[in-house]
Image (tube, grey):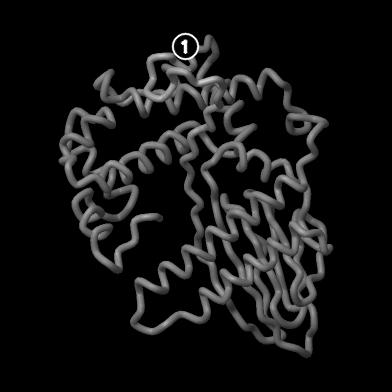
Amino acid sequence: MSINEPGTLHSLDGRMSPDIQTAFHVYAAHWRKVDPKWSYPEHTHPMFEINVVLEGRQQMLVGNKAYTQAAGEIVFIRPGVPHSSLVADPEHEMTYYCMHFDINDLALRRALLKLDVVSLRGDTPEKQAFRRALDHVIRAAILTESGNVQRNRLVTLQASLQLFAALSGWVLAETPDAGPSVLAGVTENTVALAHAVEGLLQESVFTAAATQSRGGWIEEIAARLGYTPNHCNRAFRQIYGMSPRQYLSDLTIRHAKLLLLDNTLSVDTIAHRLGYRDVSHFSKQFKRWTGLPPMGYRRNAEEPSGSFLG
């Protein structure tokens, strides 16, 4: 802490909390009632999945291990794990809720990837909080008010934030204070390299305006760290379950969205701050990321029913 910063003169002690900026993405969440003949074939996807049975029973095969879910029981599936499902009782219907999600906070993402837990059974306070939050999300999805788009959006957002908090609490409870700090078969050097790559990716986004270039390419970062690009790519994916390029894109999208919420900034200025020399290139890239051009995204955010948090 610099003694020249406002408010620091005559200060006796102090601590700075880390800056927090993250995104919790929910994909293809759905409630569904099915007949006894229903099944879903084996598949994989790059998202985390939460699946809860509301009525009846479900048989799930996750990574070649069978799980039978009774009503109220939750299954947690990590990205890339093969899984399939079918109704467990051939004479009764089943109702379930499924949510796919991703999180770009690398600390939480890494903790989730390390969990071997699949079935969330038991009555610990953390699991109870997780289930209550999930129930809130399900109610928000089912009990929507016709025509009240803005209120429905806020109710869903509140429920999603509660689930995010409960998810973090569950992960903390499942993560021991002491013990192995790395994934099985991963060295501390690999973790350190992944952390270094992460830091340089973040630095590249926030220094783009000063350097007047879109940095963060893995070739540049690898050269700075003294490793090959393939080695850096492999280490980052091994620790965080995503590529450096994907993480850089997420950072850039999030920063662009925040800047677009400031109406005093032109699209040209925002493109420059993100290191784009050609504003049309930025506009095309932004539309490819979000489905909207920058000004369309800004107008959507300003409208009462607009959605700008996705």
With respect to residue 116, does 180 lie above or below? above
What percent of the width, then of the height, locates residue 97?
A: 62, 72
Q: Position of residue 213 (x, y in %)?
A: 27, 22
User: Number of labelled discs?
Assistant: 1
Q: Is residue 216 visible?
A: no
Q: Identify whether 296 is placed above or below 189.
A: below
Quick one: quadrant of the C terminus? bottom left
Relative placement, left or right, of 16 versus 3 is right
Q: Secondary structure at mark 1?
A: helix
Mark 1 is surrounded, within 10 Å at the Cα level, by few (under 14), some (14 to 19) or many (20 or more) other residues, namely few
Which quadrant would residue 238 be assigned to in this image? top right
- Of all residues shown, which one is farthest toward the front? 10
Relative height, residue 251 to residue 8 (above, below): below
Q: Residue at x 74, y 64 (%)?
A: 128
Q: Is residue 93 left or right of residue 256?
A: right
Instruction: Tell me the amino acid under the disc marked 1.
Output: Arg
Q: Residue 302 in the image: x percent, y percent? A: 24, 59
Q: Is residue 28 left or right of residue 217?
A: right
Q: Is residue 228 visible?
A: yes
Residue located beneath label 1 in the image: 224
Residue name at image x 23 percent, y 38 percent? 282
Q: Looking at the image, which residue is at 28% across and 41% down?
A: 259
